[in-house]
Image (spheres, grey):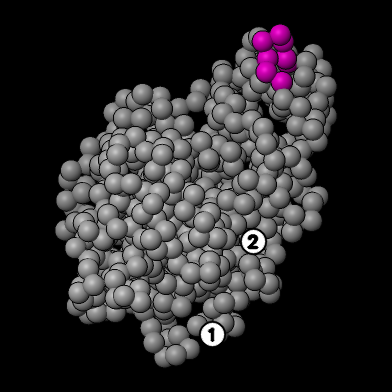
Amino acid sequence: MHNRFDRRRFLQGGAALAAAGLLPAPAAQANASRGGADLVIHNARVLVLDKRFRIAQAVAVKNGVVQALGQGREVLRLADRRTEVIDAGGGTVLPGINDSHLHLGGFGLDFPPFTYEVDTATVEELVEVVRVAAQAATTPDSWIRGQGWNDNRLPRPPRRADLDPVSGNHPVVLTDFSGHAMAVNSVVLRLAGITRDTVPPAGGVIEKDADGEPTGVLRETAQGLVSRLIPPFTDEEISQGIDTGIRILHSLGITSITEPGIGLDRLALYEKKAREGALGVRLTALLSAGVEPRLLRETLAAYRPLQGVDPRRLRVAGVKIFADGIPTAAKTAWLHEPYLDGSNGSLVIAGSTVQEQVANLHELIAIAHAKGLQIGTHATGDATIDAVVAGYLKAMGRRGGDPRHYVIHGDLTPEATLRTMAGRGIGVNMNATIKYLLGRTLDPVLGTARTDYQWPYRTALDLGVNVTSASDAPVTFPTWLQGVQSAVLREGRFGGVAGEAERITVREALATYTRTPAWQDHADRWKGTLDVGKAADICVVGGDILGVDPHELINLPIDATVLGGEVVYRRKASAAASTRAASRWHARGTACLEGGNCCCRITHA
């Protein structure tokens, strides 16, 4: 992306400001915009997040960019009667968070009125959620979707006898936390034609009561009898879900995201929102490449560059390639050395042999690279990662330019490959929050050494690789403070440390959520740090990120979020709600990952 900021207009008159005493040593820095600041945030530790890791006490914003940094008293002199002033109460101010791998469409549809949370302690509480959903429905026969019930927590699964009295004519389908079971009401059973005589598909279970009648609980492949009937979300519902997701992102301090693997229909929706000024986040998109070269060529032939859209708000960077599975209990990632049980995963690229699959993978990369597109490739197993990086190097040739191709996830990237990636400007997008979810649970799958090494943050950073961190929401809730905590401690959700040698510092972890994602976005000239003249995307945290015990990072509240100089979020309640939401996500995300379903909770995305 070309930097379209006219930096000269922000820097004119700097000498005059210095003479006026607004740039005391070591430095309050200001641009030359006349008049008062639009916004001043003071009484804070302002982390510029540049490579020198400068810290100020206050920041001023004007015309959507950072106007000044420095000591509180000096920066406050830039305020006038029209200036909005935020007292950070001694908290931390840092650049707006950039979640560099997040599925916004699926994430936003995980909330009411589209999907209801039914992770309750009792069946009665679950039934009450369904009752409220039915009462809130705008049409008498609309589908009610829920997710999260856990029959390890409940005394028994919810049944149609529980749901029927409160659901009326609404079809109700409630997926459990793992995605391996669903509970439905009688309306759904009738629509699906499921009776006492229905034979479940191979591997499926239709639970029945003492009289031989279906209870409404369907497990494994039997869910398919219902799944095919559930109507997809409409464009309007998806649009509303996106708005919901963005509001939640604002409450978490997130101002930029990368959405990987979208289709042209989703892109058209984002383009419409951007043109209408209704896309409240900076969004970098990667189009889905498909699993064979023909599909990618068809997508690129149909794609038309965005018109009339600010590329700082919506930009198509390139394509996402999906190369393998994940190295969890599902054992679908492709490894050089097999899993402990002797099995192995494979590429998911089209081809009848490994050689054909690798050739198609490399052709996909070559097609995108030749078009000048950035490539992010989902690759978790070391064999897959080596094949991907080899494809990047082949496409880039001796010169290669600066495409900033990267490996998505990169769980088990070999050290030698990381060294090669550093030398050729190939990045890696890691998932510290998933590391927290999985912890030491993969010891029986990968062995202790590979479990410790998984997501080698320390090794990658020491070798000079550009490392970004992301939530992969809705697989995990996008609580970046949880990600920072995990990258620093490497402690699992159920205890134990998985990879002490791969721990990094809080400062390094913060860079993976701010400065380095801006590099990945080809936007490091205008965002990602709080340098003067850069975009005023700001996150205000209620606490000292650098001074608090890392175990307490997840409990720090987000006090305010600023996007392009506009305050888009101010905290009114405690941080507990966000922490609870993250906690509810963990069980479901873990179950999905262990089941082999990466990004599995994306609903109709």
Q: Give the residue type that dot 1 points to.
A: Pro
User: Contact, CB < 8 Å: mark 2 with mark 1?
Assistant: no
User: Residue at image x 55%, y 37%?
Assistant: 250
**Distance from the alpha carbon under mark 2 to that under mark 1:** 22 Å
Please give left or right for residue 228 compared with residue 405 in the image: left
Q: Nearer the viewer, residue 526 or 257?
A: 257
User: Residue at image x 30%, y 43%?
Assistant: 142
Question: Across the whole image, how many numbered discs are drawn on residues?
Answer: 2
- 167 over 362 or under it: above or below: above
Q: Nearer the viewer, mark 2 or mark 1?
A: 1
Residue projecting furthest to the front? 211
At mark 1, the secondary structure is helix
User: Residue at image x 57%, y 77%?
Assistant: 441
Q: Position of residue 354 (x, y in %)?
A: 26, 79
Considering the whole magenta stretch, tell me its main secondary structure: loop
At mark 2, the secondary structure is helix
> What span is colored magenta in the figure?
78-85
First-in-chain label (2 vs 1): 1
Residue named by callout 1: 444
Q: Quadrant of residue 326?
A: bottom left
| Magenta region includes residue 369 | no
How many residues crowd around disc 2 within 10 Å: few (fewer than 14), some, or many (20 or more)? many
| Magenta region includes residue 81 | yes
Q: Position of residue 93 (x, y in %)?
A: 70, 37
Q: Quadrant of residue 360?
A: bottom left
Q: Is residue 269 visible?
A: no
- 282 over 422 or under it: above or below: above
Residue named by callout 2: 487
Q: Is residue 273 visible?
A: yes
Please give left or right for residue 189 compared with residue 154 in the image: left
